[in-house]
Image (cartoon, rainbow, N blue to C red):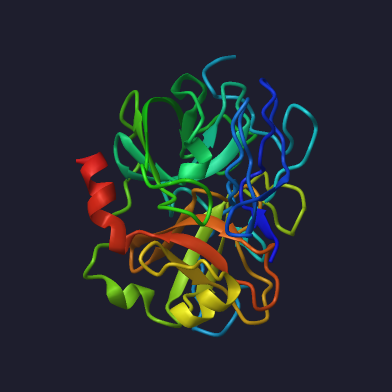
Amino acid sequence: MEATPRRPAGGARPRRVRRMAVLVPTGLVVFAVVAVGLVSFGGRSQAVTSSVTVEAGAQAGDGTGDGAGGATGDDGRPQARIVGGTRASTAAAPWVVYLTDSSGFQFCGGTLVTPTKVVTAAHCTASAPDRETFVVAGRDDKDAKSGHSVGVQKTWVSPTFKAVGDGLDVSVLTLAEPLPEKPLPLAGPSDTALYGTGTAATIYGWGATSENGTPSRYLLSATVPIRDDAYCKKSASSFDAKLLTCAGFDSGGVDTCQGDSGGPLVAGGKLIGITSFGDGCARAGKPGFYTRVGANEDVIRAQIA
C-alpha cells in the first residue's frame, strides 16, 4: 500500500520548503509540509478547523515567524488542507495552533496544552532547529496579523519515533513565552470511551481540501467517527493500537490531508489524537491515522509538567 504524508514533505536542500510523497518503512504514504532543510518523515500537517458535530455514521458537512502564512512554499508549490471541512474559529477552539518557519510559512499544526507547551507530531519537528520554528495562536486567517507568534525555545521528540508508522509520533514544544489562549486537556488512560467505535471526533487544521490539492487560507474543521482497531488494521498492516487510533467514514469524503500533520483530534473536550498519516486523503475505506494520546498520556505529561 502506498502512503501519503499529511504534512508537505521536504527535500534535504536548505532554505527550501517542498511537498512530496514519502515512502516510509511501513509502506504508508504521508503528505507533510516540511520547513527549511528538514528531513522528510511524512505526515499530514497544515489543516483547517471548524467545530461540527454529527452522529456516528453521518458526514459533517523577517525572522519573527510572523509572516503571512500563504498558500505556497518559497518554491511556489501548494500545501494541503482538511477535506470536507467547514470554516472554524480560534475563538471557539483557542488551543488550535500552527507551526511556521522563520519566513512565516506554515508547515504543521499543533495543540496548546499549557500556556508554554504545544503538542504536535514528531515528524513535524524531528529535524527542525528551534530557532526556525514558531507557534502561531489565535489566528484563523493565515494572511492576517491577529493573534500571537511565539518562538520555540525547546523541542522534545519521542525517543521511540523512527518514521511515520514506526514509533510514537509525538513532539512537545516549549515556547519562549506563554500564550494567553486557553489550553486543551489531554485524554488519559481512563478515557477509553472516547476511543469507542462511532465516537464523533473533530479534526482541525489549515491543510488541503483535496488529495494533492491547494492549502486553506483559513482554519477548518470537520467531524469523523472513531473506528475499531480491526478496521484500522485492515487499512494499515503496521497499525499498533497502543500508539494509534484511526477515524473516517466508509465512503470517505471527510479527512485530514496534506499540511494537517500535528493538529488535534478532539472528543469529549479533550485531545485524543494527533494527526499523523493516511493512505491518500478522504478515500473510501481509508481512514486517517492519529497518534493515540490517552494510552501515552504519561509520556506526554512528563514533558509538560
Residue 228 is at least partly visible in this image: no
Identify the residue at image location x=47%, y=46%: 162
Q: The N terminus is located in which quarter? A: bottom right
Q: Residue furthest front?
A: 25
Of 236 and 265, nearer the camera is 236
- Relative image position of residue 30 (x, y in whole percent): 63, 53
Identify the residue at image location x=37%, y=43%: 158
Of 17 and 65, nearer the camera is 17
- Relative image position of residue 99 (x, y in whole percent): 52, 36
Identify the residue at image location x=59%, y=14%: 62
Is residue 181 rendered to the left or right of residue 232? left
- State which quadrant residue 153 falls in: top left
Q: Residue furthest right?
A: 76
- Relative image position of residue 262 (x, y in whole percent): 49, 48
Identify the residue at image location x=38%, y=47%: 160
Of 179 and 225, nearer the camera is 225
In the picture shown, does residue 91 fall above or below 190?
Answer: above
- State which quadrant residue 17 falls in: top right
